[in-house]
Image (cartoon, grey):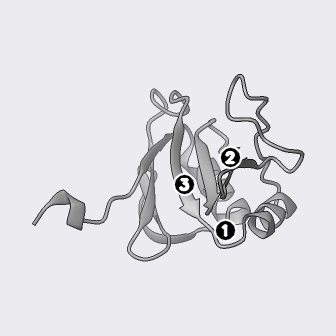
Amino acid sequence: MSLSDCVIGPSVAVTDLEAARSFYEEKVGLRIKEAWGEEMTQYECGGDSALVLYHSPDHAGKSSHTQAGWAVPDLEAEIADLKSRGVKFESYDGENGPPTDENNIFNHQGMKVAWFRDPDGNTFALNQS
């Protein structure tokens, strides 16, 4: 067996796990798969994938790149749904990130991407191709 045959999932540091849970459950709409007290929470995502949040104030929000992305069938509909729950999407001008349009979407050769940040500043993407 090779790691190419194994499921992988992102683990993201947060400063306040309770506040992060509120954001990911209420605004993003994720469901808890398993929780380990005030230290870690695993959220179920599509297929066998999962997102893990762990309490680590010294590391939360320090990464400037995208932590993970969800492949979605209808990007515009997903953005509208998340915005209705209070998620704010990033707007980039092409200098500090790929240029996004008025709907916060980057379009490139049939691929569309939009980014949002959690309360710690961790960046996530929604992708449609």
| Callout 1: SS | loop
Q: Is residue 39 left or right of residue 127?
A: left
Q: Residue at (73%, 64%) from the top-left corner?
A: 75
Q: Nearest the camera: 91 or 44? A: 91
The number of callouts visible is 3
Where in the figure is residue 79, as x and y percent of width and height?
A: 78, 61
> For the point 54% across and 48% down, which residue is it?
17
Q: Quick one: 120 or 88, which is closer to the camera?
A: 88
x%, y% of residue 70? 56, 61
Q: Which kind of residue does numbered mark 3 sit on?
A: Gly
Q: Nearer the viewer, mark 3 or mark 1?
A: 3
For this orientation, the residue located farthest to the top is 95
Quick one: label 2, few (<14), some, or many (20+) residues within 10 Å?
A: many
Residue projecting furthest to the left: 1
Compare residues 62 and 2 and report the one nearer the observer.
2
Residue displayed at 60% across by 68% down: 30
Q: Residues within 10 Å of mark 3 (few under 14, many from 20)?
A: some
Q: Quadrant of the N terminus?
A: bottom left
Q: Is residue 64 above or below residue 24?
A: above
Q: Alpha carbon of mark 1 to alpha carbon of mark 2: how far?
A: 16 Å
Q: Which residue is mark 1?
A: 29
Q: Earlier in the sequence, mark 3 or mark 1?
A: 1
Residue underneath mark 2: 115
- Residue marked by disc 3: 69
Q: Position of residue 28 (x, y in %)?
A: 68, 62
Quadrant location, the C terminus: bottom right
Nearest to the eye among marks 1 and 2: give it: 2
- Report, in whole angstroms, how far the alpha carbon at label 3 lies from the one at label 2: 9 Å
Q: Is residue 121 above or below residue 87?
A: above
